[in-house]
Amino acid sequence: MRLHLLFTSNIFLAILAHFQISKSGVFTHSISNVYPAEFVKVSGTEFLQNNKTWKPVGFNTYLLIEQAAELPHGSFHAIYSDSFGKNEILKQFEQAILLNFTCVRTWLYSINSNYPLFLEDGVYDERLLGALDWIIVVARAHGLKLILSFTDFWPESGGISSLILLSRKFLELSPDHSEQYGRSSFFTDQNYFSLYIRHVEHILLRKSKITGTRYCDESTVMAWELMVSLFLTTFKFLHLFIQNEPRCRLCSEGILQKWIWNAAKAVKSLDKRHLLTVGEEGFYASTKNYVNPAKWASDTGQNFISDHIFTEIDYASSHLWTDNWNLFSAWSRKHVKNDSFNFSKTWIEEHSSDSLNILQKPFVLSEYGSTGFGNRNNIIGSLVTTEDQRQTKVSRFYSEVHTALLQNRNGALFWIWHNENLKYLPSYQDEYGIFVSDNVFDRLRNYSQVLRS
């Protein structure tokens, strides 16, 4: 009861702080000392907070910023009213604390194409950044840390697609600089790199309208990610076959690594207090391609060890998507398709070992999830599998992953916890979504205590 009252008090103060913004939107009162919190640091292969070992254990959610902004037309056609916006976030964070979660990973931009974060070069939608201000305050009130991604490589979201559109409009690039050109040249064209760095600088130096604290000085943020799922794509026709995950074929090794190094140096020149990681899936190049799910993964431009070896990168992270990686069934390795547990176990062990022994950095499995169908586009499986059967399979997947993680002392953030209201929307389409009312959620109730032990 005493703990509950403490959380309730902190939430009340956080909400009070939200209303300290004047009608003109100008910061009027500081609460920066209300919730003292230390920055998360790295010591060897461990995370530390307040000089004690600490682990990022929690969940992913990509809808947080549009939910906090209470946009009139959200993703999945959600209508963010008072009961479906900030209030739901407060409930979710309260539940997260009761579940002993320590960390939330989310995007600092909207994935909704109707509400892009970037309006012009250097001009942003203040509704969204104001929502991020609020998220940070509320996360701090709950004692939760945030991992925030600067952008992503997915074509349908508000990541680099928005930056590329801006570049075409405001950098006066030639007609050849189409979105497809931008996606294939993003990591080699200096125009795009400059735009990306200006975006990063705008975020890091922004002052919260609630606390008056610059983001680069905000200890509630555990870490920044350079980009979610970055990879190279050089051939235009690949989009016809691979759709959402363009991959590079026969791209020269070193291009992505050079971009990571330059981007990491730029971030650290602006912000030396926060941790930084890459945000990639974690594929290996030719030297260790036996760990990959299939041959195509060696050609994405990624190389897990080389990508995280730079001093500016504080910890290593990867994703685990056995269902997604089975989309390429013609190239899939049999043990991924038919024995996902052995593959998942090997994937976690290899990445953990390379992080701890070669890179000598902590490792976090920052995304992992399952549809329960064995393949994200398994239409037949989705039709013949009952919901109970699906959740049983998803529960088994989480259990297997957590067993492997426990053996390797890693942090982990499962994919993906949505608020309950989304579940009943006719337009809801996320095969990986987990809800509190799901049976599989019981499997997640205990995993934080296990991983934090």
Image (cartoon, helix red, strand yellow):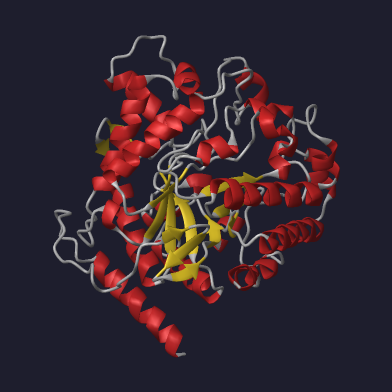
- Drawn side of residue 324 relative to residue 70, left or right: right
Tell me if residue 125 can be seen: no
Displayed quadrant of residue 327: top right
Residue, far bottom: 1
Between 17 and 100, the residue placed more toward the observer is: 100
Residue 148, horizontal then vertical, whole percent: 42, 50
- Drawn side of residue 109 relative to residue 157, left or right: left
Q: Is residue 225 above or below residue 98?
A: above
Residue at left offset 67%, top offset 44%: 321
Residue 58, horizontal then vertical, whole percent: 54, 62
Between 362 and 195, the residue placed more toward the observer is: 362
- Drawn side of residue 156 relative to residue 19, left or right: right
Residue at left offset 38%, top offset 50%: 71
- Drawn side of residue 395 relative to residue 50, left or right: right
Tell me if residue 196 can be seen: yes
Residue 110, horizontal then vertical, whole percent: 42, 44
Displayed quadrant of residue 414: bottom right
Image quadrant in which the C terminus is located: bottom right
Residue at left offset 36%, top offset 71%: 141
Q: Is residue 212 above or below residue 225?
A: below
Residue 227, horizontal then vertical, whole percent: 46, 39
Q: Is residue 127 above or below residue 220?
A: above
